[in-house]
Image: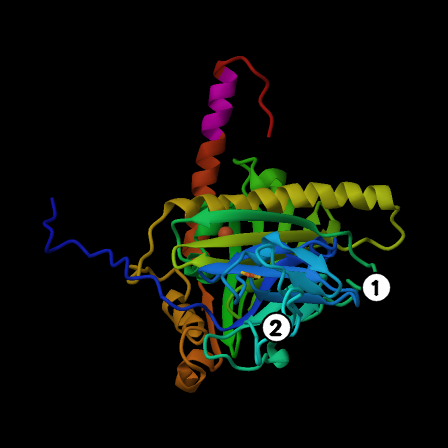
Amino acid sequence: MSTATEARSLDQGVAPSRYARGWHCLGLAETFRDGKPHAINAFDGKLVVWQDSKGELNVLDGYCRHMGGDLTQGEVKGDDIACPFHDWRWGGDGKCKAIPYARRVPLRAKTLRYETAIVNDQLFIWMDPEGSAADRSILPIQLPGLAEGEYADWSWNITEIEGSNCRELIDNVADMAHFYYVHFSFPTSFRNVFEGHMATQFMESTGRPDKAEGYSSAGSDLFLKSEATYYGPSYMINWLWVDYKGFKTEVILVNTHIATSPNSFTLQYGITVKKPEGMDDATVAFIAEKYTKMFGEGFLQDVHIWKNKVAVQNPLLCEEDGPVYQLRRWYEQFYVDKADVVPEMTERFEFEVDTTKANEFWHAEVAENLAKRAAEEAEAGRPVHH
Ligand code: FES
Ligand SMILES: [Fe+2]
């Protein structure tokens, strides 16, 4: 038995008290276009989102600067959001536009507003604790063909994660082995590239024939090529090229989160499928639904882990693990003042994991599982099939 002095410590650290600088996705833009104010929990507070008469989406701090009324429970009046407490009207530029019962509006009556952008049908805001102007050069890319109708409609999901700091999600980018254990697939090739505000995972894998969940529900007939890029601290686009018995599909998974406190975040994920040329809408919808279910399940396997694990500042790694520490150094750039971003956080870093040993062991384990299952089925008198 090891003593406390020999055992490696599990340093859970302290969750950062600030929030990541960058573009944060609030959800599908369409959901905010109903003429009502919407509440988004974010950064230890609340934001109000509404559409004005010109079709612009506006985002302000959710609490009225008069006496703290909750603007998300107010009403949209004309272009402005009206507070439910005393009807002060706030414009999308953050200025107080009118106080109907008052002779005049106090000079410089202004609240906190967020600059917005719409990319991939989704609403983004720029957040910087230092208050810098939005940097549009680092917005996530617009998916080519999306606006042209080449993809099915987004299937969009929102889930609250309590008890974890959002960095837990980021570690996934460098985590090769969890694909076998959590997503039931064999990652045969696994590479990371971190550069500037982007961090990418390149992976090729096949399904595990001894499991029938998530990515693996199609077993070893499924070959998957995946490329997942974080554009800034919280928005990931994952291109998934699926080859199922020679039938190829391009799936896109968007995975985005917004911190609600140092220890909780809202996770949103959307899935869409590229419409194969010449295919009728009903078939496209059928395929989209099938992959939404498959990758949605796969994603929930991660969510289950995140909800139950603890944070660890000092992960103990083996050779087959990806570059977790380098990834965290990349992520750090979003949590320091702009002036404190050092080259080690942003310069190009590339690393490929050697998956040979892992696959040798995994294939043997899966063969064993299949043999065991066949024996059990034979004993129970059931037909044996793979
Ligand atoms: S608190 Fe909003 S109008 Fe008074
Ligand atoms: Fe995962």
* Residue 47, quarter of the rendered image: bottom right
Position of residue 134 measured from the top left corner of the image (x, y, whole percent): 59, 79
Which part of the image, by quadrant, shows the C terminus? Answer: top right
Q: Nearer the viewer, residue 357 or 37?
A: 37
Magenta highlight on residue 124: no
* Residue 149, quarter of the rendered image: bottom right
Mark 2 CB near ligand 1 (8 Å cut) = no
Residue segment shown in magenta: 371-378
260 left or right of 277?
Answer: left
61 left or right of 338?
Answer: right
Residue 94 image label: 2
Position of residue 31 measured from the top left corner of the image (x, y, whole percent): 70, 53
Q: CA distance from mark 1 to mark 2?
A: 34 Å
Residue positioned 86% across, 46% down in the render: 281
Residue 338 image label: none
Q: Is residue 58 above or below residue 8?
A: below
Q: Residue furthest top?
A: 381
Helix, strand, or loop for circle 1?
loop
First along the sequence among labels 1 and 2: 2
Q: Nearer the viewer, residue 34 or 253?
A: 34
Give the amino acid type for the residue marked by disc 2 in the picture: Gly
Position of residue 221 measured from the top left corner of the image (x, y, whole percent): 64, 43
Residue positioned 90% across, 52% down in the render: 278
Residue 148 image label: 1
Give the amino acid type for the residue marked by disc 1 in the picture: Glu
Q: Residues within 10 Å of mark 1 (few under 14, many from 20)?
A: few
Residue positioned 52% across, 49% down in the render: 186
Residue 58 visible in the picture = yes
Q: Is residue 154 above or below residue 326?
A: above
Residue positioned 68% across, 45% down in the render: 291
